[in-house]
Amino acid sequence: MSQTAQHHPYREPPKVRKDDLIQIRASTETKALLNKAAQLRGLKLSEFMLDCARRQAEETLLDQRVFFLEPDAHAQFLALLDSPIQPDEDVRRRLRRRPSDAG
């Protein structure tokens, strides 16, 4: 049985030439775990690791965003954080339902 290249939903086509090299050391167990996850996504180990590291880096940087508010807006913002929205009756009813009740 011949195998043909398959399009995998997680795999992105190569876009630019990569000239920089990143080297890391890992335990045998960590490498095996990463390899298994990469295979599940249809990626090479290096592609998987770079994708995961890039996502984590972007998330870390987004968490550090700073924004400035006028004093009144700042007070309103803090008040909203201190008093989260309470779910209405429809949301409470849906949360009480079992998944098997959905239909």
Image (cartoon, rainbow, N blue to C red):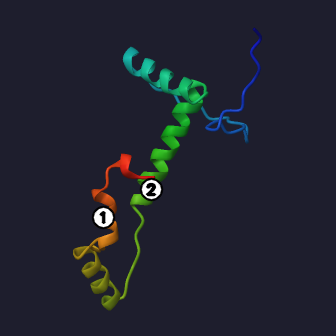
Q: Would you place residue 26 above or below residue 49 in this image?
A: above
SS for callout 2: helix
Residue at image point 64% right, 38% down: 9
Q: Which residue is mark 1?
A: 93
Residue 28 lies in quadrant = top left
First-in-chain label (1 vs 2) = 2
Are dots 1 and 2 in contact, CB under 8 Å?
no
- Residue 51: give x, y in percent of width and height: 55, 39
- Residue 60: give x, y in percent of width and height: 41, 52
Q: Which residue is mark 2?
A: 61
Residue at image point 66% right, 33% down: 8
Say which amino acid is labelled 1.
Arg
Nearer the observer, 90 or 84: 90
Say which amino acid is labelled 2.
Leu
Q: Would you place residue 44 above or below residue 63 in this image?
A: above
Nearer the observer, 75 or 84: 84
SS for callout 1: helix
Residue 90 lies in quadrant = bottom left
